[in-house]
Image (spheres, grey):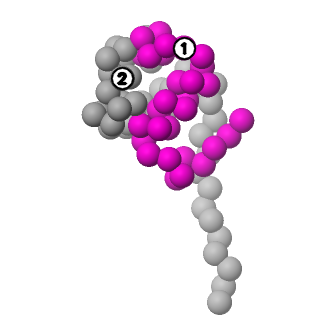
Amino acid sequence: MKFVLNDFKPEEICKILREWTDLTQEKFGKTIQRSGRSIRMLESGESHLTVETLLAIAKTHNIKIIAEKEVKPEK
């Protein structure tokens, strides 16, 4: 399964990734050394998803993050 991060808000990205793990916010938080409250705040937009947190999620849950530059056709 894959999705384009550019199409989502940071809080949506965090929720999608957590839902892929089938874990509650509390259990998901523990896997990346965060509290359930911290995950709730990320998913509600009260707190911002950092690159460090995104990488921690990816490494812990075997999620591959790929950056791809779009090549626009020449005019």
Label 2's element? helix
Q: Residue furthest bottom?
A: 75
* Left or right: 61 in relation to 46: right
Give the main secondary structure of the magenta stretch: helix
* Quarter in which the C terminus is drawn: bottom right
Where the N terminus falls, by quadrant? top right
The span picked out in magenta is 1-29
List x then y, in percent, for residue 50.
Answer: 37, 37
Q: Residue at horizontal 41%, vertical 37%?
A: 11
Question: Label 1 sits on what residue type?
Answer: Leu
Q: Magenta includes 2?
A: yes
Q: Residue at x 68, y 40 (%)?
A: 2
Q: Residue furthest right?
A: 1
Determine crowd level at label 2: few under 14, some 14-19, many 20+ residues with C-alpha closer than 10 A: some
x%, y% of residue 20? 61, 25
Per the model, the C-alpha gap separating discs 2 and 1 is: 13 Å
Establish if 14 lies above or below 66: above
Residue type of the residue flagged with mark 2:
Arg
Dot 1: within a 10 Å radius of its alpha carbon, few (fewer than 14), some, or many (20 or more) residues? few
The residue lying toward the viewer, choosing from 49 and 15, is 15
Q: Residue furthest left?
A: 46
State the image coordinates of residue 37 (x, y, percent, origin top left).
Answer: 32, 17
Residue 37 at least partly seen:
yes
Residue 62 in the image, given as x and y percentages of width and height: 63, 25
Snapshot quadrant of residue 34? top left
Would you say residue 21 sits in the magenta stretch?
yes
Secondary structure under the numbered disc 1 in the rendered image: loop
Q: Nearer the viewer, residue 45 or 48?
A: 45
> Residue 26 appears in which quarter of the rendering?
top left
Q: Which residue is mark 2?
A: 40
- The residue at which mark 1 appears reads as 23
